[in-house]
Image (spheres, grey):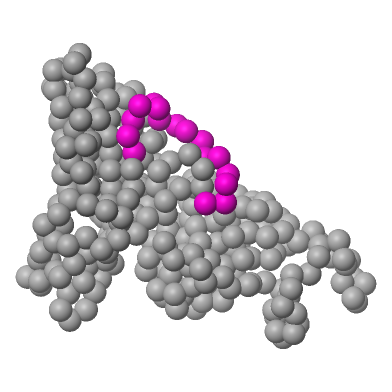
């Protein structure tokens, strides 16, 4: 399995315009002193067709506000990799090795969670 | 079982069940022997083999990849579900990943039971469930291109 390409995602890149290469410490606060929500990190995994559409990226670290749902995480990834949108309608999500039921109430992600984008499977 | 980052993956099946995902040719006899049981009157097996044509196009090779931690978990759940439905002795389920040349086994299932009907039905159930829920993907490589395949069993279960 190719899990070697890691892309950093989330706010520090957008805010810092690439100047920060290290993740901001959650407790460190922001230089501007504004109040911030607790930040969490979620590992997103891209497989098969999804990985190819994302240019070969198989893993993305999402540094996000606490309280995001799995669907919001997916939206974030689709924004970062617009080519994935062509597959979006048939993507299923799995959180920590369990399928996320599309018909169930929204599910929140926690720090350290693993969220997988599952394109239509074809094993057997 | 432990995942790559050392987390312990919950065991859901019976410990004797053989569940394997590997990047090597599947040793059919080893799985048959794994389910052999002197109290069983039957061993039913299913081999899924790779086809060399798709809609008239020649398939040169197939490439499989798995989300391994989840695939193991789903396979164990399927074995457990089969045991709840039928009276089974032993089970072995193996899926190959990586490049698989045409005409070779990509998946193999062996089930033993006291009476043959249980093993036969369980075998069919296990392959149908694999196609619907285990996160493994197959890409067919042709002379003039390639294509990610999609199992209808998965699409049926996941249409909103």
Q: Is residue B115 above or below residue A73?
A: above
- Which quadrant holds residue A60? bottom right
Return the x and y of residue B143 as percentages of the image width and height.
15, 79
Residue B140 in view, yes or no: yes
Return the x and y of residue B26 as percentages of the image width and height.
22, 47
Front one among A64 and A41: A41
Front one among A75 and B63: B63
Q: Is residue A90 left or right of residue A75?
A: left
Q: What is the number of callouts on the image?
A: 0
Q: Is residue B54 left or right of residue A23?
A: left
Front one among A3 and B159: A3
Return the x and y of residue A114 as percentages of the image width and height.
57, 54
Q: Residue furthest left?
A: B56
What is the quadrant of the N terminus of chain A in the image? bottom left
Residue A85 in view, yes or no: no
Which residues fall within the magenta stretch? B4-19
Q: Residue at x 69, y 53 (%)?
A: A111
Front one among B39 and A113: B39
């Amino acid at each position: 399995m190719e899990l070697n390409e890691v892309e950093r995602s989330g706010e520090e890149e957008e805010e810092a315009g690439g100047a920060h290469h290290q993740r901001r410490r959650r407790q460190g606060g922001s230089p501007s002193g504004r109040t911030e929500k607790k930040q969490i990190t979620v590992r997103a995994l891209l497989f098969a067709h999804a990985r190819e559409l994302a240019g070969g990226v198989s893993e993305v670290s999402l540094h996000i506000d606490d309280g995001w749902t799995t669907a919001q995480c997916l939206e974030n990834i689709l924004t970062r990799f617009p080519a994935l949108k062509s597959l979006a309608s048939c993507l299923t999500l799995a959180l920590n090795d369990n399928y996320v039921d599309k018909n169930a109430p929204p599910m929140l992600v926690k720090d350290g969670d693993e969220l997988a984008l599952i394109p239509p499977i074809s094993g057997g | 079982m432990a995942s790559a980052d050392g987390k312990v993956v919950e065991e859901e099946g019976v410990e004797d069940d053989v569940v394997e995902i590997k990047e090597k040719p599947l040793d059919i006899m080893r799985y048959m022997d794994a389910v052999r049981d002197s109290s069983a009157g039957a061993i039913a097996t299913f081999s899924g083999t790779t086809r060399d044509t798709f809609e008239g196009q020649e398939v040169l090779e197939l490439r499989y990849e798995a989300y391994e931690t989840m695939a193991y978990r789903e396979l164990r759940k399927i074995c457990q579900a089969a045991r709840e439905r039928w009276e089974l002795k032993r089970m072995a389920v193996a899926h190959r990943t990586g490049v698989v040349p045409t005409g070779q086994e990509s998946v193999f299932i062996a089930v033993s039971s006291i009476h043959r009907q249980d093993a036969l039905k369980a075998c069919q159930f296990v392959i149908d469930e694999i196609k619907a829920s285990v996160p493994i993907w197959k890409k067919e490589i042709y002379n003039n291109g390639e294509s990610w395949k999609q199992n209808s069993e998965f699409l049926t279960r996941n249409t909103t």
